[in-house]
Amino acid sequence: MARKSVRGMEQTLVIAMVGILGIGAQWLAWRTGWPAIVLMLAAGFLAGPVLGLFDPEHAFGTMLEPMIAIGVALILFEGGLSLDFRELRHAGDGLWRLVFFGVPLGWVFGAFAAHSIGGLEWPVAILFAGILVVTGPTVVMPLLRQSSVKPRPAAILKWEAIVNDPIGALCAVIAYEYFRKVAEAPGSGLFEVVPPLIFAAIIAGLIGYIAAAAIAWAFPRGAVPEYLKVPVLLTAVIVVFVLSNTIEHEAGLVAVTVMGIALANMNVSSLRSIHPFKQNIAVLLISGLFIILSASLEFEELSYLNWNFALFLLALLFLVRPATILLSLLGSSVPWNERLFLAWIAPRGIVLVAISGFFALRLADIGYDGRALIGLSFAVVVATIVAHGFTINLVARLLNLKGSNRPGMLVVGSTTWTTALAKLLHDMKTPVMVVDSSWQRLALARQKGLPFYHGEILNEATEHNLDLTPYSVLVAATENEAYNALVCNEFAYEIGRDKVFQLGEAGDDDDRHTLPIGLRGRALFESGFGVEDVSERQASGWVFRKTKLSEEFDFEKAQQRLPEAANMLLLVREDGTIRFFTHAARPEPRAGDTIISFSPPQERSPEEVAARRAGKRQKSQEAGQGA
């Protein structure tokens, strides 16, 4: 009994340390801008083989492998949920070429490189090359979030990562089953192995689709209560994964991917409410799995790495991937700068390590030495993540595929007030987008030449028609306060609760503001101006003013130059970061910042008026003389 208690304490301690290291690495990546996966791998490697703080295999024993397998399945399902067929218009014919031509070409090129350069025997090289066709959503998605790449190459990378993950697993299964058959019955051919595996994959895909259809039917009809929808969905994913794996090993990855993609395209409105939860689950799983896998690595497995493997990594980066992409996309509509970008960006992640570890042990059962695959798979992950993670922004910039680095503002509601604000920011080179469902209300924004989107911001189609990546803050300023609060509440999960704003301040002292603070966005202005307040003031001549601060002209001097009734709205830092003056937070202005204020008409003294008139008279006389 005491032994079980000690083991239980060890397991809980390991779980706590995995959580601290994983989420800590994610937070550090957010603060520094470094690739999160690199930091997680480094944290796990230091905690495991270097410092020996914990050993996941010793702590969890035989439960470790199924834990990792289910984690990978949930990650692939979550990735599938993010794939809407409407995004394929961005990917064009590039995606299908990377699936139908890229996979076999990458498999062949990778096998030759692994054998001739890496020194692996042919069966091991062929199996490992099959796994290498994956790129992996666990690393591609964070890289795309941290960089600003144009929609089409980003869409191709995302779809390729998720679609090719289960295909790579099946390639490895096909290779393993073929060599196992040959070992048991020499002379066996591919036709005895491939058709049953393809049939198993089709059956697994059907199981995933049927499960998705059942959920799409049950959820909107109230067959499952709201509080059980997430547990039912997660349980269904695990059941589908396990059931499909009983048909054929790794077929479960196909099933859960199909299940996610099918659900994403069945227009199940009730799934919108669980999007924040699934994103949180994905972050936790990715963090935990990377820490566990890197902490499980042993120095003995690294001893297999040699100069041949180093040359193989270089070939993988500079020969195999570029040749695969460029040949696959020959004659396609994808521009050459995007082809070169796709030829370079191909980071590998959890699926590669997990599947390599699985087959490394089983290859020994049929007479081949696959122990080198464990260390080599980690080497591939580290090399590709470091090489691509630290260069994606540079390569995108060189190939003219970089979006704006400056944080932007999404303005919901086209009014004279929001249009004036958007115009000022637009002139300051800050990305801005005015969104409204009324074409008539957008007329002023169109006249001013502002970027606009005609549509309902809360419509699910907007997520696929409007790229929200460039916008770091949202301002909801329609004439309906409740609608503004609804918009802020909807986008708080995606943009951040502290980065969604609306006019007006909740409080009991004003009958106009009846919504609780928890249901609203942050209030614009420290004074809590509402829609009517800004409209009345704008009608009486109030305008937006921008004031650039410097070492000599600080914030206090800027305030003195403005009318006493002026209200500070926001400041824009030199790097484009936007900070608002609200009732809850007040940024610290510094030299280089530009202050945006909402101010009454500037009152001038009689002397200033006379000087202004004299200046105009002089300019008029000079113009007359010039004529």
Image (tube, rainbow, N blue to C red):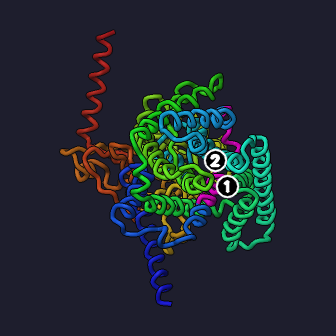
Residue at (73% x, 73% y) in the render = 225
| Outermost residue, front side | 186
**350 sits to left or right of 573:** right
| Distance between mark 2 and mark 1 Cα atoms | 9 Å
Is residue 113 found inside the magenta-colored segment of the image? no
In the picture, the disc for residue 250 is 1
Residue at (39% x, 39% y) in the render = 307
Stretch of the chain drawn in magenta: 72-93
What element does badge 2 sit on? helix
Q: Amino acid at mark 1?
A: Glu
Asked whether residue 153 is in view, the answer is yes
Residue 328 rendering spot, x and y as whole percentages: 63, 29
Instruction: Please name the residue that numbered disc 2 is placed on.
Output: 172
What element does badge 1 sit on? loop
| Outermost residue, bottom side | 1
Which quadrant is the C terminus positioned in?
A: top left
Q: Amino acid at mark 2?
A: Ala
Residue at (41% x, 67% y) in the render = 20
